[in-house]
Image (cartoon, rainbow, N blue to C red):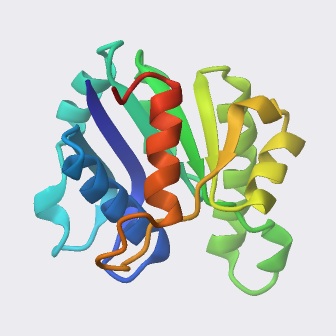
Amino acid sequence: MKITIITPSLDPHDAISIDVLEQRKHLLGVKYQVEIFSEFCHDSIRPLLATKEHVIQCLLEPDNLLIYHHSIYWELGEKIFQLALCSIIMKFHNISPSFFFEGFDPLIFRVTQQGRKQTARLINSGKFKWFVGDSQYNVDELIHCGVNKKQCSVIPPFNLLQGFENTAPVTKIEKTLKEFDYVN
């Protein structure tokens, strides 16, 4: 089984990016094949990326797994998601309500508004096997959007804590993967 992690952007000092990169690092450490893809990427991270074409090929294999980090409107991500024939997990990082940005930043207002609508479309697709929130607040938001609470868990974001083998994200992601027989 190959695990593909996708997110709209990767930057070395961004919290969601750190979560993605540390998740990749951990999964590689427990001997999974892991690919990551991002449309917008800092040059220092670019060598880690798989091509869009390779990612799509991986997602067409039913035995593989897609972890979709959802944090803002991402048109290409939704197109890639729609092509996937494998199991899919949403890692939900919360999308701020657009009204916070109204009158201050038209671009952020638009992409947060579109992102919240996209959240509903993704959920209503019925394609997700599991939903993971960074916090109980995020899980509650997913439930409010119609997700069955029995399909949800909280896994705090990975961070840059070096040398802490039993931190919550590490043990919780292993537990979640074991529930789906992804870990022996």
Give coordinates of residue 62: x percent, y percent. Answer: 36, 12
Q: Residue furthest left?
A: 47
In the picture provided, is 109 more to the left or to the right than 128?
A: right
Identity of the residue drawn at 74% across and 57% down: 138
**Looking at the image, is 163 positioned above or below residue 180?**
below
- Nearest the viewer among 81 and 152 is 152
In the picture provided, is 34 more to the left or to the right than 177?
A: left
Q: Which residue lies furthest to the bottom in this view?
A: 104
Q: Quadrant of the C terminus?
A: top left
**Looking at the image, is 46 positioned above or below residue 91?**
below
Give coordinates of residue 129: x percent, y percent. Answer: 59, 25
User: Would you say residue 147 is visible in this rendering?
Assistant: no
- Nearest the viewer among 81 and 101 is 81
Identity of the residue drawn at 30% across and 79% down: 162
**Looking at the image, is 114 positioned above or below residue 57?**
below
Give coordinates of residue 86: x percent, y percent. Answer: 41, 19
Identity of the residue drawn at 35% across and 66% down: 165
